[in-house]
Image: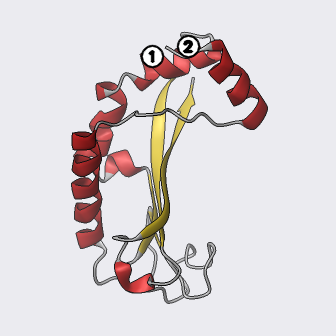
Amino acid sequence: MISEDQKRAFAEYGFLVLEDFLTGDEVRESALACDELGRQAADWEFSKEDFNLEAPVGRVQGQDGKRRSYTGVIRAVHYIEQHSPWFAELPHRKRLEEDVIQSLLDTQSTHYLSGIHWNKPAASDPDSRGTKTSAMSMKTRFGN
């Protein structure tokens, strides 16, 4: 369940940090799932579909699929649940809808829509293929 402090923080800042949301084993499993996504994009030089690659100019410049990006270096995977069974099961396994979202929004009329995995390669090593990251998070969208 979500505390009143967490609800206030969400209302003020627009995001919620869930401490210890994944166990150590789940972190390792998510890394394996991300490795599988990386293998799918290993030889790509351009972003395509829901996969955004990291472009040499940085930021979101590689998202349009028209700029050559670092080969196989994923910046984000949109609708990740459509590309990874592990991420498809995550909201159900962790009861995101029941234990987090419905409590946070004080409503029963919402459901999981999609997830985005952000994986920012370390600026000092763009060829890391995501093994070294300066930030990693999962953004989820919910709706009616």
Query: According to the image, what is the colour scheme of the structure?
Result: secondary structure
Numbered tag placed on residue 103 in the rendering: 2
Task: Indicate whether 3 appears above or below 33.
Answer: above
Mark 2 Cα shell of 10 Å, populated few (<14), some (14-19), many (≥20): some
Task: Indicate whether 58 appears above or below 93.
Answer: below
> Quick check: marks 1 and 2 in contact, CB under 8 Å?
yes
Can you see residue 45?
A: no
Residue labelled with disc 1: 99
| Quadrant of the rendering where the C terminus is positioned | top right
Q: Nearer the viewer, residue 50 or 21?
A: 21
At label 1, which amino acid type do we have? Asp
Q: Secondary structure at mark 2?
A: helix
Q: Nearer the viewer, residue 140 or 111?
A: 140
Identify the image quadrant of residue 34.
Answer: bottom left
Can you see residue 87?
A: yes
Identify the image quadrant of residue 141.
Answer: top right
- At x 73%, y 21%, the residue is 8
Give x and y (percent) for residue 54. 50, 77
Mark 1 Cα shell of 10 Å, populated few (<14), some (14-19), many (≥20): few
Q: Residue furthest right?
A: 12
Task: Indicate whether 11 appears above or below 60.
Answer: above
Is 73 displayed left or right of 120 in the figure? Answer: left
Q: Nearer the viewer, residue 21 or 83?
A: 21
- At x 38%, y 51%, the residue is 80
Q: Secondary structure at mark 1?
A: helix
Identify the image quadrant of residue 133.
Answer: bottom left
Mark 1 vs mark 2, CA separation in Å: 6 Å
At label 2, which amino acid type do we have? Ser
Give x and y (percent) for residue 2. 55, 17
- At x 68%, y 29%, the residue is 10
- At x 29%, y 36%, the residue is 23
